[in-house]
Image (cartoon, helix red, strand yellow):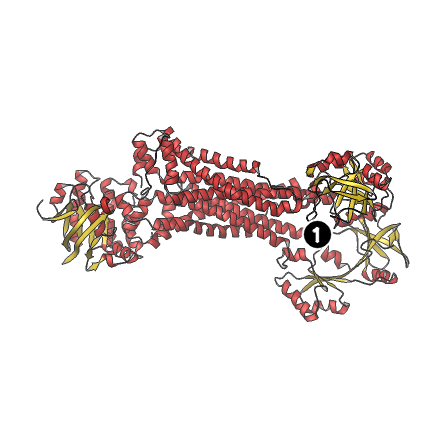
Amino acid sequence: MRSYLSLAGISAKAHRKSSRVTQLCIMIAVVLVISVFSMVDFEYMHMTEKLVRDHGNWHIALNHVPKEEAESVWNEADVKAACWYDTFNYRLDQPICLDGRPICIIGTEESFFTDFWKDMLTEGRFPQNGSEALLNQNAENILDCRVGDAVVIQTPAGEYSYTVCGFVSDTSYSLARDALIAVLDYTEMGRMAEANGQAREMQYYIQFKQSLSIKKTIANLKASHGWTDENVAENAALLGIMGMSTDNYIVGLYGVAAILVVIVVLAGIMMISGSLNAGVAQRTEYYGMLRCIGAGKRQVKRLVRREALHWLLLAIPAGAVISTLICWVICAVLAYGIGGEWAGMPVGRISWIGIGIGVLVGTITVILAAAAPAKRAAAVSPIAAVSGSGDGQNAGMAKLGKAPVPIALGFHHVFAKKKNLLLMTASFALSIILFLTFSVMITWIENALTTNKPYSPDISLYYSDYSAGLGSDLADDLRGIAGVKHVYARMHRLTEVENCEKANKIDLISYDEIQFAWARADLLRGDIEAAANETGKVIIAFEKGTAFELGDTMDVNGKTLTVAALLSDSPFSAGSNPTVICSEETFSEIFGACNYSVIDLQLKKGYGDETVADIRSIVDDKVILSDRREGNTETNSTYLAFSVLVYGFLAMVAMITVFHIINSISMSVIARQRQYGMMRAIGMDSSQLRQMITAESLGYGISGCLVGCAAGLPLHAWFYRATISNYWGIAWQIPWPQLLIIIGVVLCSAFVAARGPVRRIMSRPVTEAVGSL
Amino acid sequence: MQLLEVNHLSKTYGSGDAAVHALKSASFTLQKGEFAAVVGESGSGKSTLLNLIGGLDTPTAGSVIIDGKDIFSLNDKELTVFRRRNIGFIFQSFHLIPELNAEQNIMFPVLLDSRRPDEKYLDELLHVLGLEERRSHLPSQLSGGQQQRVAIGRALFSRPALILADEPTGNLDSENSREVIRLLKETSQKYSQTVLMITHNRAIAQSAERVLRVSDGVLTDLGRCI
């Protein structure tokens, strides 16, 4: 023993058993912080890989920059790779066709596939000369061609023949447009574009060597060449995730992690501080004695802090192991259970960043949490040791009234110390406020991630100009294909309205029976049946800024339409005009017999590409078959992952609440241990003791609930209005289910919390409880 | 040579009708190396007197001068340092640090003072107190008498000028009580320390060089007779 501080280590070891709760609190805090940051780290790895796959591994692209000037970048910066890239008929709106279908032409260099989009080339090799072309897999399927086949691209300037030298994979973007793509050598593509009078819009993709100064390099290049933002396009997603951009996803993610960590730290400080405080209260005489034999206030403070840090040393290894296991389970669930865009989540890796931050935040939390108890211990007067009464003085006189004495005493303990009541109430209320506020996220997810709705189609059929050319006989034929679950179609017309103050033009859309049925889930007010069954009755989807109400009328093509129902949402974002939904009968009555503009299909489970091929075989070649399955899976998995996150977080808040309440009550009992021992000595039995402690515990629970609801409900309403009502028009209501759940959790925990401490007190001899130091 | 000077020391708890005058204008002096006992009934004000002399409590009036220093002119920090260097406490219920062994308990106040413990003096003290065999034992492994001897060792180890003992034999049987008092007298003489001890035990009081009685807060110097 070299210094008085060695006492902290010896004391921590000696009290290892009795300080189990404190150690557990510290470990939970460490586990939560490491888990949060490890998950962010894993998501960072996963997102980086995904962004490189989806957006390409480039940092900047130069536009409208002369060739020599662009290539001079090699001399000015640490460039790892660069390549030229250009597109022709990207929007598929020019008469550039392959086999009668519009085709997008891409001109680039081999480096595009070796350095920027590594996994894109699925078969063959990059064109070695002007007579070779790569096609996308959609083209491979539609044209049924192979490597070595000859293809001819028709353009207004003439025909161009190429030999297929390989295939590239489709992206969800090309799938949704059902697009054919040909990749040519960039000089060959330039020849074709120029022959067709197309102005070149060459882009020069640049990938810098890994460096922390990409931001600075970009700024320097812009300054030295006088390039503007128009000349230099940044790969915002990739630079964002590298922390090199200001407008980015990962900064948001770190923001969320930071908020979570602040909450965890607050909860951790609350829990750890509570248990340390109780430890101090229990050892008042001990600290008094230390002061008697000459310990200064600062020395006592240091001892308390050092003791807490000793527990941290024990908690860190356990916390790191547990949180890493938790992260592995979450990653495995995301990667194998949810799949989709989460399929690439790394499983079985260790996040050193997460562990490092966990250790740092854990240490800070413990130091902060130990501050108040250390101050309290240092404030113990030395006379407490010699007089033997450190605590429980000036508690005020108990008003026993008519209630049974134990219950009256229990409630008296609640109100006896105002500061304690304030702290307990505030900490219980904080849990309720957190739970209520974050429960708004559940409603947000339900509304924001729309493709998870029952009406989300797997396949959409339409003409490129959205003309009404799809007949009801086609819809019937489609229903007959094996693997097709639902076929639902819509007529559409952008039309002018008269005698209506609220709009000049509307998007009028027809619904069939099944779509009306789905719409019921989004009904704000009114009667959907009226719109479905009566001609002249319509539904309007709520849009922020429009003020249609039930009963409003408008004239379309001489026919009066009455608003019969309002929806919170519809599958369409119809630009600036209100979306008005009517039955097919109403639509035909206004405009005469019409074909559909869009036919949507949902596939049965287990049916996939073969069904899509069957569908393609019966529709006209000119019809765009938009395959949304991949996009849907991605959004579905995002929905699932968000749900896991939000429900997981709410469960965490509930768990912390339970733990904190049990801990607080247990600590409060420990602090009064001697008093309870005395009561036992003068004849209080175990059931009376239980009544007294339960009354005290419920007292704190009830005051916490009252304050928590008083503060949490307005906050919930405000948060709800800001995030839900403003966008979907759903009015705020008291969230009874969430409220009942959290109040139930608080009161049940408060009730259960009394059991353990009572059992512990009863198991100790009275003399020990009275005379313990 | 005078070590302790108590001048008109008073302590009143509460005020108005509820005021309790625990100590009323007590004055006396003690010489260096003197061994004095304080006697009186329960609640007479003995412990209040001891707490005030030790600087654990603040007086309503009066002063305490130890080795020429008025302890109530010191601020809290200075008083703490003064206490750990100049005053040793011995309590009725020992108040040892339960996690530390006998030897560590004895040297702890010196460690608080950031000084290196004098190993030779520690061995000597353990020998004098008959604790050589028990130096590595925790308080829970020692008998009451042994625990009180450790407490005496702790009080002596920083070589304080004044030792304040509040019923050091209150929790001991008669044999252990005699032994503890013998040790206290022996060591205080050997190291020229002044001892002020509260006791209820008539025989122990009689063995003191000087006896002070406190009754209803009033201190009377009984000299050597009791």
Percent position (x, y) of residue A317?
49, 46
The picture quadrant where one finds residue A435 is top right
Q: Which residue sits at x=19%, y=48%?
A: B23
Picture layout, residue A67 above or below residue B13: below
Q: Which residue sits at x=64%, y=63%?
A: A214
Q: Residue flagged by tag 1: what amino acid is it?
A: Arg
Q: Is residue A274 left or right of residue A441?
A: left
Q: Is residue A1 left or right of residue A429?
A: left
Number of numbered discs on residues: 1
Seen from the viewer's position, the closer of residues B62 and A362 is B62
Picture layout, residue A67 above or below residue A16: below
Percent position (x, y) of residue A654?
52, 39
Picture layout, residue B155 above or below residue A734: below
Q: Is residue A480 left or right of residue A291?
A: right
Task: Give the structural element (helix, strand or loop) at label 1.
Answer: helix
Percent position (x, y) of residue B51?
23, 49
Q: Is residue A430 left or right of residue A416?
A: right
Seen from the viewer's position, the closer of residues A492 and B157 is A492
Which residue is the extreme one toward the bottom? A224
User: Is residue B128 at all visible to an observer of this figure?
Assistant: no
Instruction: Give the residue pinned by disc 1.
Output: A53
Percent position (x, y) of residue A58?
70, 58
Q: Residues within 10 Å of mark 1 (few under 14, many from 20)?
A: some
Q: Which quarter of the rendering shows the C terminus of chain A?
A: top left
Which residue is the extreme one toward the right? A158
**Subunit under mark 1:** A
Seen from the viewer's position, the closer of residues A545 and B172 is A545
Seen from the viewer's position, the closer of residues B163 and A348 is B163
